[in-house]
Amino acid sequence: ETGVTQSPTHLIKTRGQQVTLRCSSQSGHNTVSWYQQALGQGPQFIFQYYREEENGRGNFPPRFSGLQFPNYSSELNVNALELDDSALYLCASSLGGRETQYFGPGTRLLVL
Amino acid sequence: GENVEQHPSTLSVQEGDSAVIKCTYSDSASNYFPWYKQELGKGPQLIIDIRSNVGEKKDQRIAVTLNKTAKHFSLHITETQPEDSAVYFCAATNIQGAQKLVFGQGTRLTINP
């Protein structure tokens, strides 16, 4: 059974740029949730995708957007990067939106 | 919306002793409470979870208790080992909707040999 994978592992961008982060869900899982974890804090929910549709969104601005593909992998896109977007971005997959979420290793984003 | 408070923020115990981490939640609709362990440079790893129809759950050295009336839940680790050193997060959600996990602030647990 393959676990949740994310790419890239690290990324450095400058303010105003755009970034795309990728996540492959665990085998058999059809739901992907994205979280932002600032240094020293708990993860904060960004949004969830279930069968290619957005299924809930946290308190993040529209410049945070996502996609889920037919193979259930997912992308997180962030436009107009701000310094405060520097964080660890985590994706978690689950079987259905109501089951246990399993996290990937995360992508560390640094905005300069 | 849901708010989860976690205490203590840091905890240091001697190897072999027990460690207890406590969380409180605000939303009475929350019915699923997972605990995650996060090691440096890694994503959170699920270690145990509990649903609201159960008051206690145990898995080897790890146990979780839930008091729905008081909106408290706790993680208990017995016979601690050096590899238990990590940051631990509690979380809460209502699994009837989109499973938006709301996390506590984390507890940095250090096991002293």
Image (tube, coloured by chain):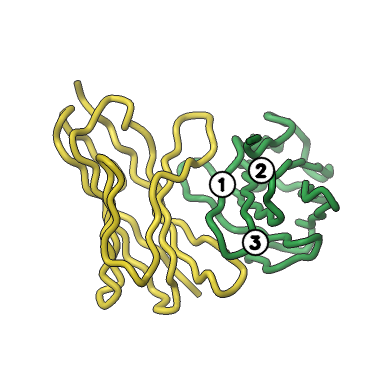
Chain colours: A green, B yellow
Query: How far apart are labels 3 and 2 at the CA level?
Result: 12 Å
Image quadrant in which the N terminus of chain A is located: top right
Circle number at residue A26: 2
Residues marked 2 and 1 touching at CB (< 8 Å):
yes
Q: Which residue is mark 3?
A: A96
Question: Which is more N-terminal, label 1 or label 3?
Answer: 3
Q: CA distance from mark 3 to mark 1?
A: 12 Å
- What's the residue at 35%, 61% (across, down)? B5
Residue B74, percent from left and from top: 27, 56
Tell me the SS state at disc 2. Answer: loop
Does label 2 or label 1 sit earlier along the sequence? 2
Q: Position of residue A43 (x, y in %)?
A: 53, 51
Q: Chain of mark 2?
A: A
**Mark 1: which secondary structure?**
strand
In this picture, residue B86 sits left or right of residue B95:
left
**Circle 1 residue:** A102
